Amino acid sequence: MEDKPRKHDKMLYTIIAEFRRRHYVFQIRADSPQEAIEKWADDVDVGKIRDFGRLSKDFLRTRLRQFGVNVVPGLVNVYAWDGAIGGFTSSIYLVETDES
């Protein structure tokens, strides 16, 4: 059986970010979960996340580079990061998304 050709060279990841009790959803293409989360953190528009400014973004970028994302036990292709940003508990979930 032949593999179905992919339309893109990179995987599609869906990012679900929770910040100050609000949820935001993004999609990004990357070669790996770590590259996806770092690229998202670098590129995210602070104006699209309420009360998320430049300092919060810089802090998050540093934390993601230091600690990365962790596999969520019991799930396939799901990764997570949890931590405090600006004194608020935040969670980021990264899901490798199937485009078929």
Image (cartoon, rainbow, N blue to C red):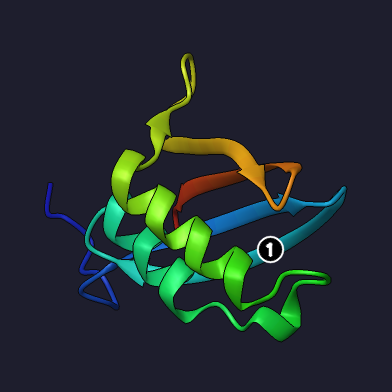
Mark 1, residue position: 25
Q: Is residue 1 above or below residue 60?
A: above
Residue 74: x and y in percent read: 48, 14
User: Toward which corner of the image does residue 9 lie, by quadrant?
Assistant: bottom left
Can residue 99 be spotted in the picture?
no
Q: Which residue is drawn at 16% across and 55% down?
A: 3
Q: In this view, does 48 lie to the left or right of 4?
A: right
Q: In this view, does 79 lie above or below 12?
A: above
Q: In this view, does 88 lie above or below 55?
A: above
Q: Residue at x 47, y 36 (%)?
A: 78
Can residue 42 be spotted in the picture?
yes
User: Toward which corner of the image does residue 49 lie, by quadrant?
Assistant: bottom right
Q: Residue at x 28, y 60 (%)?
A: 35
Q: Which residue lies furthest to the top in this view?
A: 74
Q: Which residue lies furthest to the right in this view?
A: 21
Name the quadrant of the C terminus: bottom left
Q: How crowded is mark 1: few (under 14 residues within 10 Å), some or many (20 or more)?
A: few
Q: In this view, does 53 lie to the left or right of 93?
A: right
Q: Is residue 32 left or right of residue 28?
A: left
Residue type of the residue flagged with mark 1: Val
Residue 55: x and y in percent read: 59, 70
Give the tally of numbered discs. Answer: 1
Q: Is mark 1 on a helix, strand or loop?
A: strand
Residue 27: x and y in percent read: 53, 69
**Could you say which is closer to the camera, residue 64 or residue 70?**
64
Residue 45: x and y in percent read: 61, 83
Q: Residue furthest left?
A: 2
**Could you say which is closer to the camera, residue 98 or residue 56?**
56
